[in-house]
Image (tube, grey):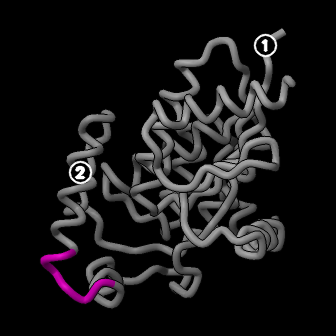
Amino acid sequence: MPRTLRLDVVIDVVCPWCFVGKRQLDAAMASLPDIGFSVRYRPFQLDGSIPPEGKSRQRYLLDKFHDPERIEAMHERIAAIGRDLGIDFRFDRIDVAPNTLDAHRLVHWASAEGKGEAMVERLFAMFFTEGQNLAERATLVAAARDVGLDPEVVERDLDTARDISTVEDEITFAARVGITGVPCTIVNSKYAISGAQPAEAMADAFRQIAAEEAA
């Protein structure tokens, strides 16, 4: 039987480096057919203080980075990296910086049905390539429908407090164990790979960890 590594991948769905990191992770896992992987996406919030309705993305970036030229250079750099990974970053389409708590609840519910990876991919695409507003209930319900969740159940549950404390507890736990930036991949609850590492580097790390675990 192939060795199996358990990956807890800590992300925020509005983090462009997390989108890059997911594609790098996918490539790394695909290059290791002799190793099995169990992947669970875990929540992190780059800014939990954003109001539920979101705020102007331009205002958010200016408040954080101050310099429009710096912001443009960052976007150009990430877009170039994304193109090599098949990601069409369209930062010009993004008007709203959302609070991602409800989006993380959606990932949590999708994961319970074996659709967590599909939900993460869909939310990334909605935000970074389509410019959709993840603070809008209709956008989240559409994401649920797209990955095969029951949209009526999701729409109903988003209007309740279902799993808010569960997601908030996971976000708090990530901070408590020292995760200050994402993406961060925890392997078998013992090894941490920080940042959007190249696929080759991640594959090398997985090979080494699998060998150590087997020994």
Q: Give the residues in magenta.
A: 65-70
Q: Which residue is drawn at 76% across and 31% down?
A: 5
Amino acid tagged 2: Ala
Q: Which residue is drawn at 26% across and 35% down?
A: 84
| Apparent side of residue 19 relative to residue 81 in the rendered image (left or right) | right
Rendered position, 146 above or below 18: above
Q: Where is residue 70 in the image (x, y as percent from the top left)?
A: 19, 76
Q: Can residue 200 be seen in this view?
A: yes
Amino acid tagged 1: Pro
> Residue 144 — which label?
none
Helix, strand or loop: magenta stretch:
helix
> Residue 2 — which label?
1
Q: Secondary structure under badge 1? A: loop
| Apparent side of residue 214 relative to residue 89 in the rendered image (left or right) | right
* Quadrant in the picture for the N terminus: top right
- Gap between marks 1 and 2 measured at Cα: 36 Å
Query: Which residue is at the front of the view, 179 or 48?
Result: 179
* Quadrant in the picture for the C terminus: top right
Q: Position of residue 192 (x, y in %)?
A: 68, 52
Query: Which residue is at the front of the view, 178 or 101?
Result: 178
**Sooner in the amino-acid sequence: mark 1 or mark 2:** 1
Rendered position, 163 above or below 28: below
Q: Which residue is drawn at 68% across and 12% down?
A: 34
Q: Is residue 8 magenta?
A: no
Residue farthest to the top?
1
- Residue 184: image quadrant is bottom right
